[in-house]
Amino acid sequence: MTKKQKKSAYLDPLHSIGYLSRINFRAFNKALEQLIAPHKVSQGQWRFLRVLWEENGLTQKDLSDRVGITEATTVNGVLGLEEAGLVTRRKSKVDARKMMVRLTPKARSLRNKLIPMVVKVNEQALKGIKKKDIVVARRVLTQTFNNLTSEDD
């Protein structure tokens, strides 16, 4: 394939991995949002809850790193979670400059209700796709992420 052919191939959105990733991300978000909305949880809140269900009691900085967003966005997100009664924020006993974010019982009780919804969305998305193709898709998406986020460049 010539350079010109490669360049024109990426101009077609359906040949661009970036475009396909973006529209899939949006479709996943929409499908999940419809399922979690009755539980009064937004997409933004979902991302924080998902991390905190795995590791409760993180600093806002650590939470920001794990969710993959800026610290300023995390501060606003955590304030919203706090207002919704889903987290508490307390100064760290080890370092008073750090704020620790902990789930409330209300947020912990949502886990068993919301996780099956993620499973449902993923199963819906993967319906009719062979397991070996799913393995390849995961490997490819993981590698593209690593390629774009590695600091070796």
Image: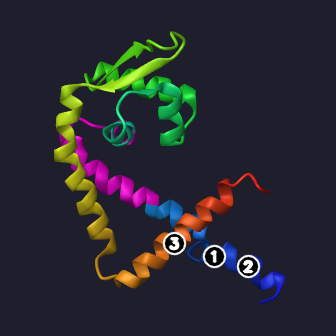
- Gap in Å between the C-alphas at discs 2 and 3? 26 Å
Q: Earlier in the sequence, mark 3 or mark 1?
A: 1
Residue 93 vertical position relative to residue 112 in the rendered view, above or below: above
Majority secondary structure of magenta residues = helix
The percent coordinates of residue 106 (x first, y second) are 18, 28
Residue occupied by mark 3: 139
Residue 8's disc is 2
* Frontmost residue, 53 versus 137: 53
Q: Check disc 3 and report its element: helix, strand or loop.
A: helix
Residue at 40% x, 84% y: name it: 132
Residue occupied by mark 1: 12
> Which of the 4 image quadrants contains residue 88?
top left
- Pick out the residue farthest to the top: 96
- Gap in Å between the C-alphas at discs 3 and 1? 24 Å
- Residues shaded magenta: 25-47
* Residues at discs 1 and 2 in contact (Cβ within 8 Å): yes
**Is residue 45 on the magenta stretch?**
yes
Residue at 27% x, 37% y: name it: 41
Residue 126's disc is none
> Which of the 4 image quadrants contains residue 4?
bottom right
Residue 47 vertical position relative to residue 61 in the rendered view, above or below: below
The amino acid beneath tag 1 is Asp
Residue 78 vertical position relative to residue 14 in the rendered view, above or below: above
**Is residue 145 on the magenta stretch?**
no
- Pick out the residue farthest to the front: 94
* Frontmost residue, 134 versus 43: 134
The percent coordinates of residue 50 (x first, y second) are 34, 43
The amino acid beneath tag 3 is Arg
The amino acid beneath tag 2 is Ser
Quadrant of the snapshot with the N terminus: bottom right
Front label number (3 vs 1): 3
Residue at 50% x, 9% y: name it: 96
